[in-house]
Image: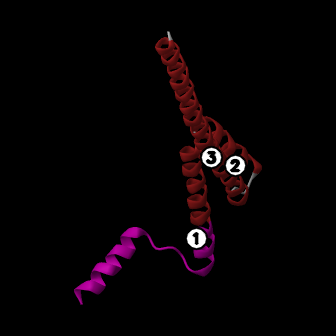
Amino acid sequence: MTLTLNNRSQNKESSLTQALQQIQQLNSKIQELEQQHQDYVQKQQNLIAASAEICISPIQEVQALRILIYRGETGCRQYLRSVLVKQSQASKMTTGQIEKPALSKRAKNQGFLQNSKK
């Protein structure tokens, strides 16, 4: 009889120990997920701030936010890069037209080839 009671109490203790271990595992997983979520939120906030700095018009900003929502971080970063490239090209065009007429790629390549033959 005593042996049976000891076995039952040992089984209960091992069950409780297993339950405690599972609770600890779940708590650590929850902490990990919370950290991942905080990192995600921080990245989103950084992208929103970057889009506010990069985008010239409100329409571009709204488009960046839409892309962020529907396509995610990667899509938004691609869009913002394309906006930066367009802005860079536009500024080069305006400064190039003021300073000197732009040479075509072919003319530039011809000049390079002629200089390299010398």
Q: Which residue is mark 2?
A: 60
- Name of the residue lying farthest toward the top: 1
- C-alpha gap between disc 2 and disc 3: 31 Å
Amino acid type, residue under disc 1 in the picture: Lys
Sequence-first disc among 1 and 2: 2
Stretch of the chain drawn in magenta: 91-118
102 with respect to 108 (left or right): right
Percent position of residue 104, x then y: 43, 69
Quarter of the picture holding the C terminus: bottom left
Q: Is residue 64 inside the magenta stretch? A: no
> Which residue is most to the bottom?
118
Q: Taken as a whole, is the magenta stretch helix, strand or loop?
A: helix
- What residue is rendered at 67% in x and 55% in y? 46
Q: Disc 1 on helix, strand or loop?
A: helix
Residue 14 image offset from top left, x and y in percent: 51, 25
Residue 107 vertical position relative to residue 83 in the rendered view, above or below: below
Where residue 24 is drawn, which disc sits there?
none
Circles 1, 2 touching at the beta carbon (< 8 Å): no
Residue 62 x, y percent position in the rendering? 72, 44
In this view, the residue in front, 99 or 90, is 90
Q: Nearer the viewer, residue 34 or 83?
A: 34
Name which of mark 3 and mark 1 comes first in the sequence.
3
Q: Which residue is mark 3?
A: 35
Please tell me which residue is depicted at 39% across the width and 75% down the height of the picture.
108
Indicate the amino acid at tag 3.
Gln
Q: Amino acid at mark 2?
A: Gln
Outermost right residue = 58
* SS assignment at label 3: helix
Residue at label 1?
A: 92
Q: CA distance from mark 3 to mark 1?
A: 43 Å
User: Residue 114 placed where, x, y %?
Assistant: 28, 83
Between label 3 and label 1, give the one nearer the viewer: 3
